Structures are given as structure tokens and as C-alpha cells.
């Protein structure tokens, strides 16, 4: 069945609804003939926010020449091995003895530009630049592990810091200020806007139905099959019904409320899944991405499940166009080029072949 026809097929036993509306734009071409183009508006099952699948939206692909200056050694990079111990800050002694947390190639330290009270940077690799396929399962596992360890130490030091997320901006189109691959830890008494909205909606769903929305979502998606990608360990990988960015992929960890509940098996499964998605992004022609792994509040997380979202950004080009315009930044509504069902079709084959 064509995904465009199948998206509204509902499971009447589930409270989750996948609602979308088809719109047709009509206009006259320069030669006077009538042109009709379709537009689909989709509504997120949890928040009710909308996004658009728009015919003709194009996200530029990678240009290898634009990467040359990133791949060369950079004597001024603060994250490279010869400088990192001399120029990066240290964690408070009361939080961690030794100043920086290390595992494998990963090194974590406070962020000089604190976007949250206990913001940290976790360098992924000793290499100054990585192709997306260079974000290996082991590198990601070490990086996630050191981030979780940091969250645990900070929360023991300051229980008010209960809102956390693990994030990656890779390359300049993603908002990253340095090309050297690194993650950022958000840890704060206050949730971000999206975390707050998701929490409120998750609690409402739990109160109404006695179940966690996130588990109902992935069970529903697996049964329907349209956007379900794979199981990796106990993690479930899907594409988003109403995406918030290009090529959005999501994962949910059932029975896991906070980042501190993640086991090594979970971290390994998340790392393997992220690595597979990034390999697919690279094969598809992209090299810049954003990722966020969201935790429930560390003190109480009723109805929450740890989940992540990752999207591609405009690839590095000599003169690239940002993929965030008025729709995304000022209307909080994404306009993307491909139906999530078609992305899931491609990803299922890629996960199966790994």
C-alpha cells in the first residue's frame, strides 16, 4: 500500500492517533497550463504540533571539496590531543576528582559557554574530523558512558539538577561552532521547552490511560510496520510520523525512565543504532546532523521513557543554504522533502544488512 494512503489507517484499540490532511495547491504555469501540487500536513500524536511533507523541498547533498579545510589538522583546535589538557576547563573537585572524565577516546569537561547550569562537552574522538561512518559504535558507547557518568556525579552533588539531555551538533550547518566531533550534555534545574511540553503531555497520557505513551507508540508503530525500522537490544527504532526535521529517526528505550536507568546493554544498543543511522545518512549524501537523547527528570519521571531524535542538516557546501527558515524558527513547524514511511523503507534494509 502507498504510504500516503496508509498513514491514517488507525488501530481502534489504541488511544494514539496518526492524523494528517492532504492539501492541493493549484496555479498556472508560465505557459498557461494548470499545475497541481500536493502538500501533506501531519499532526504529532503526543503534542499535536504539525509538520509538512512538501513536494519540491530539496535538502542539498554533500560536496567533498567543501570538507577539505575541515579534514586538515588544525593547530588551534582546543579539542585535539595536543591541546585538550592545556586549554579546556575542569569539573569542580567536589563533583569529580581529576577535573575531566575520560573513557576510550572520549574526554568530558565543562562547557566554556554554559547553555545549562552544569553544561559539559564530551569530545568523541582524538581525530579532528570524522566522516559520519567514523562515529563507530565503540566511540559512541564510550561517549555516552562518560556523559551518563557525569550526570550521575552532578546529580549526587546537586539533586536540583534533574533535567538532562545528551546532544550532538555536527559541522557548521548543524549549529556546531567547532568541527572536531563532540557531544554536549544539558543538565539543569529547568527543562527545555520541548522537554517540558513532552513531559506535560506524557503525564497527561499516563493519567488518562495508565500506560507510557512512548511504549504505546513503538508498539503501535511495530504493529503497523509503516515507520518501524528495527529492534536493537531493547531499543526500538522508528521514523517520526510528524517529523521535526529532515530524515528524522527516533528511538525509544522501553521500561527506562531516565538516563541514569540506562544499562551498558542499553548504551551499546543506542550506540549501535546511532552508528547505523549515521552510516545511512552518509550513504544518502549528508554529513551534518543533530541528535538529542532526552531523559525524564531524575527525581520523578512518571510516564516518561528515554528516547532520542536525530535529523540531517544541509550538507557542507562552499556556500550552503540553511535548512531552517521562517517555518522552523518562527512557526515551530518543519517542512521536509520525504515521507517518513519511505525513509523507514530505506533504513530497514540498512539495519538488516548491518
Image (cartoon, grey):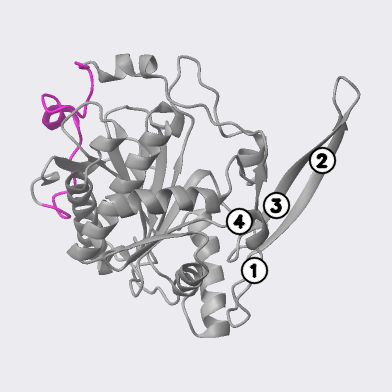
For the residue carrying disc 4, how many other residues have a C-alpha within 10 Å: few (<14), some (14-19), or many (20+)? Answer: few
Q: Mark 2 or mark 4: which is in front?
A: 4
Q: Quadrant of residue 171?
A: top left
Where residue 25 sits: x, y (%)?
82, 40
The Cα–Cα distance between marks 2 and 4, rounded to whole angstroms, is 20 Å
Q: Main secondary structure of the magenta part?
A: loop
The Cα–Cα distance between marks 1 and 3, rounded to whole angstroms, is 16 Å
Where residue 8 sits: x, y (%)?
66, 65
For the residue carrying disc 2, how many other residues have a C-alpha within 10 Å: few (<14), some (14-19), or many (20+)? Answer: few
Horizontal side of 299 relative to 193 (left or right) equals left
> Tag 4 or tag 1, which sits nearer the N-term?
4
Q: Mark 3 or mark 4: which is in front?
A: 4
Circles 3 and 4 in contact, beta carbons < 8 Å: no
**Magenta-highlighted residues:** 73-96
Circles 3 and 2 in contact, beta carbons < 8 Å: no
Circles 1 and 4 in contact, beta carbons < 8 Å: no
Label 4 sits on residue = 3
Label 2 sits on residue = 25
The Cα–Cα distance between marks 1 and 4, rounded to whole angstroms, is 10 Å
> Tag 4 or tag 3, which sits nearer the N-term?
4
Q: Secondary structure at mark 4?
A: helix
Q: Quadrant of residue 187?
A: bottom left
Residue 119 seen: no
Q: Residue at horizontal 41%, vertical 27%?
A: 172
Label 1 sits on residue = 9
Amino acid at each position: 500500500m502507498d504510504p500516503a494512503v496508509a498513514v491514517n489507517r488507525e488501530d481502534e484499540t489504541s488511544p494514539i492517533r496518526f492524523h494528517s490532511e492532504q492539501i492541493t495547491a493549484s496555479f498556472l504555469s508560465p505557459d498557461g497550463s494548470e499545475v497541481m501540487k500536493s502538500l501533506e500536513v501531519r499532526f504529532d500524536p503526543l503534542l499535536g504540533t504539525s509538520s509538512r511533507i512538501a513536494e519540491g523541498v530539496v535538502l542539498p547533498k554533500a560536496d567533498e571539496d567543501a570538507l577539505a579545510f575541515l579534514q586538515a589538522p588544525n593547530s588551534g583546535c582546543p579539542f585535539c590531543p595536543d591541546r585538550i589538557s592545556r586549554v579546556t576547563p575542569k569539573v569542580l573537585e567536589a563533583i569529580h576528582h581529576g577535573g575531566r572524565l575520560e573513557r576510550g577516546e572520549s574526554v568530558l569537561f565543562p562547557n566554556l559557554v554554559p547553555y545549562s547550569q552544569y553544561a559539559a562537552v564530551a569530545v568523541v574522538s582524538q581525530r579532528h574530523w570524522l566522516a559520519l561512518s567514523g562515529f563507530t559504535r565503540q566511540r559512541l558507547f564510550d561517549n555516552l558512558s562518560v556523559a551518563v557518568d557525569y550526570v550521575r556525579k552532578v546529580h549526587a552533588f546537586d539533586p536540583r539538577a534533574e533535567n538532562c539531555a545528551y546532544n550532538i551538533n555536527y559541522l557548521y550547518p548543524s549549529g556546531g561552532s567547532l568541527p572536531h566531533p563532540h557531544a554536549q550534555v544539558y543538565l539543569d534545574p529547568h527543562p527545555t521547552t520541548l522537554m517540558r511540553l513532552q513531559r506535560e503531555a506524557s503525564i497527561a497520557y499516563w493519567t488518562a490511560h495508565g500506560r507510557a505513551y512512548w511504549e504505546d507508540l513503538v508498539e503501535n508503530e511495530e504493529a503497523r510496520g509503516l515507520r518501524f525500522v528495527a529492534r536493537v537490544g531493547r531499543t526500538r527504532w522508528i521514523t517520526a510520523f510528524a517529523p521535526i526535521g529532515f530524515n528524522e529517526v527516533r528511538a525509544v528505550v522501553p521500561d527506562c525512565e531516565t538516563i541514569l536507568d540506562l544499562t551498558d546493554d542499553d548504551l551499546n544498543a543506542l550506540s549501535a543504532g546511532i552508528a547505523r543511522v549515521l552510516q545511512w545518512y552518509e550513504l544518502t549524501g549528508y554529513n551534518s546532523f543533530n541528535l538529542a537523547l532526552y531523559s525524564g527528570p531524575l527525581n520523578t519521571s512518571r510516564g516518561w521513557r528515554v528516547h532520542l531524535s536525530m535529523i540531517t542538516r544541509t550538507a557542507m557546501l562552499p556556500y550552503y543554504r540553511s535548512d531552517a527558515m521562517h517555518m522552523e524558527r518562527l512557526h515551530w513547524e518543519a517542512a521536509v522533502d520525504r515521507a517518513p514511511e519511505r525513509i523507514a523503507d530505506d533504513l530497514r534494509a540498512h539495519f538488516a544488512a548491518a
